[in-house]
Image (tube, grey):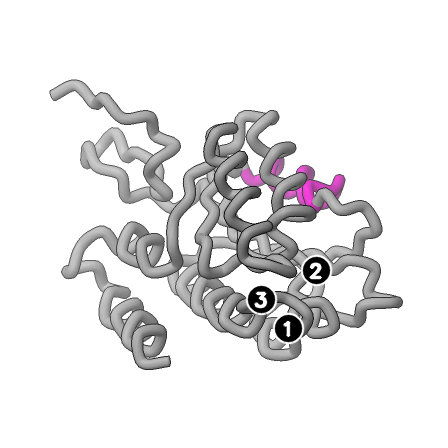
Amino acid sequence: MERKLDEKYYVNSFDEESGIYNKKDHILLLVIDEQPRLMNALENGENTVLNTITLIEASQKYQIPVLATEQYPKGLGNTDERILAKLDKNNIYEKTIFDAATAEVLDFIEKNNIKKVVIAGAEAHICVYQTTRSLLNLGINVFLPKDALASFKENQKEEALKTLREMGAVRTETETLLFDLARDSKDPNFKFISGLIKDMRDR
């Protein structure tokens, strides 16, 4: 049967051999500026950090690469220690510009043939907004889990997500992405993913 939906709506890529969307070798998780000095000032900042950790753990289970940025760490400090504990320090990049599509990030995307980027972090209406716009402009599909994004006020995040959706980004949630990654209850990692989802629901 002919496929009608654009592939941008699937976080997994299409596998010609199996005829299903189950390939994960073109996905990147990008964590933007989750530094305590910033996150503590944002509405739902703590929940954003917790959901970001969930996305990191799921990504690592599927061997999906994770990059992170830090906005002016000399002034704002480093990434939340709970996130740092799960990341390769070589994959964390300092920046002063708000757009996290830095030279290092774009170089990684090009070298690893990344086609889909899941973004978590802050602030949704500033750094996430500018980063998403840049990636969309380069033809990269972007997924924005709203519960893993934060702004000073929720209405700022909502307005940014509305505009980014109009640009072509996919607005979603952490739990939706986890089920999309697993795709099948027979997936060998589904028990692990189910545990992450249970922990989210129990908070």
Tell me which secondary structure the magenta stretch mostly adopts. helix
- Dot placed on the residue nearer the N-terminal end, 2 or 3: 3
Quick one: label 1, few (<14), some, or many (20+) residues within 10 Å?
Answer: some
Q: Amino acid at mark 3?
A: Glu
Residue 24, placed above or below residue 168: below
How far apart are labels 1 and 3 at the CA level? 22 Å
Quick one: label 3, few (<14), some, or many (20+) residues within 10 Å?
Answer: some
Q: Position of residue 10 (x, y in %)?
A: 33, 39
- Which residue lies under the disc numbered 1? 84
Q: Position of residue 7 (x, y in %)?
A: 34, 30
Q: Amino acid at mark 2?
A: Ile
Image: magenta residue range: 100-112
Residue 77, placed above or below residue 7: below
Residues 60 and 34: in front is 34
Question: From the viewer's perspective, is 15 left or right of 30?
Answer: left
From the image, which quarter does the N terminus lie in? top left
- Which residue lies under the disc numbered 3? 43
Q: Secondary structure at mark 3?
A: loop
Q: Residue at x 44, y 52 (%)?
A: 145
Which numbered marker is on residue 55? none
Question: From the viewer's perspective, is 159 left or right of 105?
Answer: left
From the image, which quarter does the C terminus lie in? bottom left
Q: Residue at x 46, y 67 (%)?
A: 51
Q: Position of residue 71 (x, y in %)?
A: 77, 58
- Dot placed on the residue nearer the N-terminal end, 1 or 2: 1
